[in-house]
């Protein structure tokens, strides 16, 4: 590989990993804000402030949205808002790493459902085994049982993520990278406020809460988004996918460092199986470059 290509690949790898670390740091800080304004209030701050940052950065109004796309964009933004709300609610009941491990089942399910290769049954078995280990089975392992509410909320977030991908294909095909900015704006205007204001109330406007909310918005949404856009321009799709497979493990480590969330050996094994399923699926995907935004 030429030195220039190696340099480009290295930049892409570092950008992808930095995006994951940033996003999970944002999740860790968000969980620290829950006692003040609740998971709903924190979601409102993240989505609203991220929308402002993304709108200021992308300035998507320079390219008008076709009228035929309005309904699809509204649905896309609604799913984005609900997905953020559900995963933050899940964080309030179970460790971050486990919630993310369950949530990534959404996009993984889409990839495996479209595949017909026999080896993909191996990745399906890994994913199913990991998910089974995370289920709240108190009769089998009382000390490892998770709060069923957190598991259900993370599973609902996984379903939303799958829907988000399916809905987003048509929107992104027309709007490109502007789709996320518009989608976040829709979520901030019509979905998240009624879910967040009722819980956070006037505390949402306290200066230190707003400051922390802005940090969460940048770390969880704006910065990872920008880093991943740059990485996708430099990496083949399967390499980018393999790097993203580390998300549950990075989330678990972030929860441990920032929040003292300690996982049992069985839960770490579950995360390892899920990471294996994600990495295997990405590794054997068609080695093509994704379209640059």
Image (cartoon, rainbow, N blue to C red):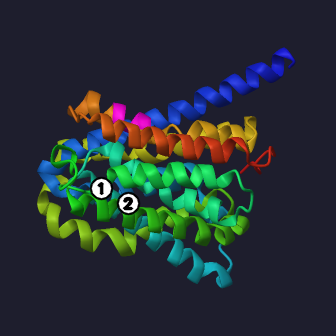
Q: Which residues are magenta?
A: 249-253
Report, in whole angstroms, how far the alpha carbon at label 2 lies from the one at label 1.
6 Å
User: Residue 37, located in which quarter of the rendered image?
Assistant: bottom left
Q: Residue at x 15, y 65 (%)?
A: 199
Q: For the view shown, which residue lies furthest in the front direction?
A: 140
| Left-right relation of 109 to 50 | right
At mark 1, the secondary structure is helix
Pick whichever, 228 or 276, lies toward us: 276
Q: Position of residue 184 (x, y in %)?
A: 47, 62
| Residue linked to disc 1 | 88
Please tell me in which quadrant of the rendered image residue 235 appears: top right
Give the residue number, with chain letter if any, for mark 2: 84
Q: In percent of the image, x 79 and y 45: which residue is there?
A: 289
- Measured as percent of width and height from the top left, residue 5 is found at 82, 23
Front one among 163 and 201 = 163
Name the quadrant of the N terminus: top right
- Are the residues flagged by discs 2 and 1 in contact, CB closer than 8 Å? yes
Residue 22, position in %: x, y?
A: 44, 35
- Mark yes or no: residue 258 visible: yes
Question: Which secondary structure is most common in the magenta stretch?
Answer: helix
Residue 188 in the image: x percent, y percent?
A: 38, 66
Q: Is residue 225 magenta?
A: no
Residue in the image at 79% along x and 49% along y: 286
Q: Secondary structure at mark 2?
A: helix
Residue furthest to the top = 3
Q: Which mark is residue 177?
A: none
């Amino acid at each position: 590989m030429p030195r220039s290509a190696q340099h480009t690949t290295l930049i892409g790898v570092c950008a992808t990993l930095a995006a994951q670390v940033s996003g999970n740091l944002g999740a860790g800080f968000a969980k620290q804000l829950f006692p003040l304004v609740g998971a709903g209030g924190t979601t409102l701050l993240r989505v609203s402030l991220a929308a402002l940052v993304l709108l200021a950065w992308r300035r998507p109004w320079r390219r008008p949205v076709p009228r035929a796309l309005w309904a699809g964009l509204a649905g896309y933004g609604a799913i984005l808002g609900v997905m953020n709300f559900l995963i933050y609610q899940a964080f309030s009941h179970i460790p971050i790493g486990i919630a993310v491990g369950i949530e990534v089942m959404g996009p993984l399910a889409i990839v495996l459902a479209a595949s017909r290769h026999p080896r993909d049954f191996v990745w399906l078995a890994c994913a199913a085994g990991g998910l089974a280990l995370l289920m709240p089975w108190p009769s089998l392992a009382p000390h490892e049982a998770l709060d069923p509410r957190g598991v259900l909320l993370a599973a609902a977030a996984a379903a939303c993520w799958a829907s988000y991908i399916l809905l987003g294909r048509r929107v992104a095909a027309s709007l490109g990278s502007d789709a996320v900015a518009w989608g976040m704006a829709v979520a901030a205007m019509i979905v998240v406020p009624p879910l967040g204001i009722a819980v956070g109330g006037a505390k949402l406007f306290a200066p230190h809460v707003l400051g922390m909310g802005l940090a969460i918005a940048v770390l969880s949404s704006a910065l990872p988004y920008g880093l991943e856009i740059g990485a996708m321009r430099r990496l083949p799709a399967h390499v980018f996918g393999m790097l993203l497979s580390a998300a549950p493990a990075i989330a678990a480590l972030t929860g441990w460092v920032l929040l003292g969330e300690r996982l049992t050996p069985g839960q770490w094994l579950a995360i390892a199986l899920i990471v294996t399923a994600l990495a295997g699926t990405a590794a054997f995907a068609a080695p093509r470059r994704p379209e640059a935004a």
